[in-house]
């Protein structure tokens, strides 16, 4: 099978893992099970280092439209606390203006961004999630990026994607839309896994980003390549600040048989204080700016 890289378009790839996911059991929620690590067939581009799943079902995004993910609500406190660490970094680049959070879910990041003085809007496919966000008086679009980009070209000072880009069926199409949405000089912020990180290399298929709903696995090199081709220049990379609470960590490790041992080691930390901020290699927080 010839696999065309969705980042650089070349067909110079090697297979990393065969498909082992049962599509009928594929989860599009935060529920963690022993099946969570099963994926579509994955291949690596030898040119730009991007890793992607091929083949995948058409219009896979439609699975998010009607999803109800009550498990996600267990993560909202952590997301808000992480936002309080990330927004001061964003402030150093763009001090004010309008933010679009793509895949805004129930609006945690946007709510904190408002507290930092930004105007905010969100885009979310899930009707359930977006309705919760609207009850918080947040403006949320239920549409595709390409549709929004046609209506709101050069509108946003900042566009953020937290845990979103790995779900894109066509990264080039989506990056083109992101570039259109940004004002010249606007900031793009992406949080995703770094498939070239030490954690990915050490854990192999046990790396936590290997999930059936993830179909794109970026390295910093491949994300730089994708963004640059659509007029966005990489300016900085950091590690995402994962704010952890005991129950959240326990839930996140549900797919791993080694969970009891890890929690036994971590329990003394959470007895000392209930919240810890971890900077875990492989959690890439990427910043780019649209060329003027």
Image (spheres, rainbow, N blue to C red):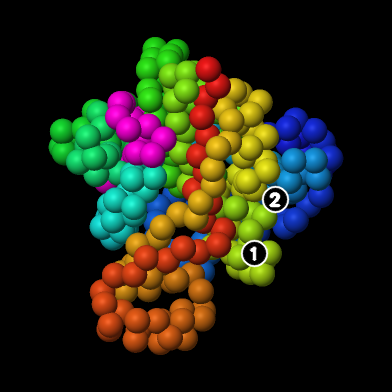
Q: Residues within 10 Å of mark 1 (few under 14, many from 20)?
A: few
Q: Residue at x 31, y 74 (%)?
A: 246
Q: Is residue 65 above or below residue 253?
A: above
Compare residues 132 and 22 and report the one nearer the observer. 132
Q: Please give the label number shown on residue 42.
A: 2
When the figure is inspected, residue 151 is found, relative to residue 245, above or below; the finding is above
Tell me where residue 221 appears, x and y as whole percent: 68, 43
Mark 2 or mark 1: whose residue is earlier in sequence: 2
- Element under disc 2: strand
Magenta stretch contains residue 147: no
| C-alpha distance separating marks 2 and 1 | 19 Å
Where disc 1 sits, the SS reads helix
Coordinates of residue 106 in the picture (x, y in percent):
27, 43
For the question of whether residue 66 can be seen, the reply is: no
Residue 213 located left or right of residue 136: right
Confirm whether residue 261 shows in the render.
yes
Image quadrant occupied by the N terminus: top right
Left or right for 249, reference 139: right
Find the magenta span and give its range: 91-108
Q: Residue furthest front?
A: 92
Q: Nearer the viewer, residue 70 or 205?
A: 205
266 sits to left or right of 220 = left
Question: For this view, does 240 lie left or right of residue 198?
Answer: left
Q: Residue at x 16, y 38 (%)?
A: 136
Identify the mark at residue 198; answer none if there is no mark: 1
The image position of residue 16, as x and y in percent, is: 75, 56
Residue 255 in percent (x, y) is at 49, 70
């Amino acid at each position: 099978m010839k696999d065309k890289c969705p980042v650089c378009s070349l067909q110079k790839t090697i297979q990393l893992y065969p498909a082992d996911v049962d599509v009928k059991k594929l989860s599009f929620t935060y529920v963690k099970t022993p099946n969570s690590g099963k994926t579509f067939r994955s291949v690596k581009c030898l040119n730009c280092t991007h890793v992607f799943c091929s083949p995948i079902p058409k219009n896979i995004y439609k699975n998010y439209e009607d999803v109800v993910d009550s498990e996600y609500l267990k993560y909202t406190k952590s997301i808000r606390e992480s936002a309080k660490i990330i927004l001061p970094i964003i402030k150093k680049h763009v001090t004010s203006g309008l933010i679009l959070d793509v895949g805004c879910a129930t609006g945690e990041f946007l709510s904190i961004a408002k507290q930092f003085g930004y105007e905010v809007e969100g885009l979310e496919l899930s009707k359930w999630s977006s309705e919760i966000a609207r009850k918080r008086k947040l403006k949320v679009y239920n549409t595709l990026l390409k549709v929004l980009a046609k209506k709101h070209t050069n509108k946003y000072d900042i566009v953020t994607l937290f845990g979103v880009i790995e779900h894109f069926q066509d990264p080039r199409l989506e990056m083109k839309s992101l570039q259109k949405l940004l004002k010249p000089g606007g900031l793009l912020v992406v949080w995703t896994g770094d498939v070239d990180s030490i954690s990915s290399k050490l854990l192999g298929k046990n790396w936590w980003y290997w999930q059936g709903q993830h179909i794109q696995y970026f390295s910093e090199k491949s994300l730089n390549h994708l963004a640059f081709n659509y007029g966005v220049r990489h300016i900085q990379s950091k590690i995402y600040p994962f704010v952890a609470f005991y129950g959240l960590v326990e839930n996140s490790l549900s797919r791993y048989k080694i969970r009891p041992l890890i929690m036994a080691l971590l329990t003394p930390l959470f007895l000392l204080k209930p919240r810890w901020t971890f900077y875990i290699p492989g959690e890439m927080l990427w910043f780019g700016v649209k060329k003027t």
